[in-house]
Image (cartoon, helix red, strand yellow):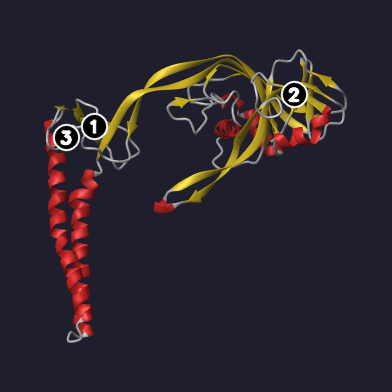
Amino acid sequence: MKAIRLHIKQNSANYKKEETVQNRMTFPLPPYSTVIGALHKACGYTSYHPMQVSVQGKYGSLKTKMYKDDCFLNSLNDDRNLLVKMKNPDMLSSAYQVVATAQKAQGNSFEKGITINVINEKLLEEYRFLKRTKRRIDKHKKIINKMKTRLKEMKADENISAEEVKEFDKRIKHIKAVYDEYEKVKYTIPYSHFRTLAKGPKYYEILCDIELVIHIVTDDNTMNDIMENIGNLTAIGRGEDFVEVLECAQTELTEVDEDVDYEKDDFDVYMPVEYYEENQSDMDIISKTDGGYAGGTKYFMPKDYVVEQIKGGMRKRVFNRVPVIFCQINYLDSGCKGIMLDKTENGIYSVFLA
């Protein structure tokens, strides 16, 4: 079986676990999706090219760094954090102007001017005017509720014709449409330009002195594209997690036709659970962590995804996840099924394609 073998080094990297927020934890090795995404970017692909990937490697140390996080809240709060106005609200831009800052954790009010530091008086007055506009609109919209009550009474009154009821209902809908459009233009859109900004310390984990060996199996055309564009592979993980490609070579994978002892090897691997369950009696794995699954740590590793439509015209990625064991291979017996070997001058790599 033909494959590409990549030998890569990184000074540091964070392969973020997507469910972590306060402390951006990292996977010990890059997930399949991260590797596949980096290769697609290097080749300039805009659509998915199916491929199988095997990831193994090691890192020297792990450290935690603190950074200041700017977080725009989903709701606009009048009593806390920073009141800001977006400079380009109709674009994918995070540029903003600070309007005012709260002096206490709670109990402040930007509208009433209670315990705040005013940064931009003009924008603050615009914010207060919008709040007053909303109250005026809500007051006038109460007329619609009274008209709806009257409509129910008309429907119950046998002396009022169906034509009159229909005409009155039509009038209510027209007035409501006028109010809704006025509210959208005069309040909803301009008010959405103001946001609450929360600042605070957060943390992220950094792996240092990383060495990776990645095997890729795909069709011939994609394999040729990867070989030709490997110089465009600049980072794996974050944009600043630069890589040094020590080797990019085509290789031939073989089945496990001999006993392999990895006692001196210190590379960890992602091994899909199916390989372990099928070859449990013919292999031995070890782990640096206590507990876990069969001597290793189990992850549901993202690989590829499909885009699904959700409410509000938004879209989300739904990942295909592969259950894997993060471990070290101690030995493999001849005849292990599904597992491949890459025999090189520097040793034998076990390849677990997913």
Residue bearing mark 1: 80
Residue 274, disc: none
Q: Which residue is mark 3?
A: 110
User: Which is more toward the observer, 308 or 155?
Assistant: 155
> What residue appears at the point 61 percent right and 39 percent down from the top-left corner?
321
Give the quarter of the figure containing the N terminus.
top right
Nearer-N-terminus badge (1/2): 1
Q: Quadrant of residue 288?
A: top right
Of helix, strand and loop, which one carries label 3?
A: loop
**Regarding mark 1 in the picture, which secondary structure is present there?**
loop
In the shown orientation, is residue 349 left or right of residue 170?
right
Above or below, 208 relative to 291: above
Residue, x 78% and y 31% (percent of image)? 339
Per the model, the C-alpha gap separating discs 2 and 3 is 60 Å
Disc 2 marks which residue?
285
Residue 224 seen from this side: no
Is any part of residue 277 visible from this angle? yes
Give how far across and how far down residue 213 sits, in percent: 67, 22
Crowd band around label 1 with a 10 angstrom C-alpha radius: few (<14), some (14–19), many (20+):
many
Q: Of the residues shown, which amino acid type is indicated by label 2?
A: Ile
The part of the image, by quadrant, that contains residue 353 is top right
* Residue 97 at x, y percent in the picture: 22, 31
10 Å crowding of disc 2: few (<14), some (14-19), many (20+): some
- Left or right, 193 with reference to 319: left
Give above or below for 178 relative to 306: below
For numbered disc 2, what is the local secondary structure? Answer: strand
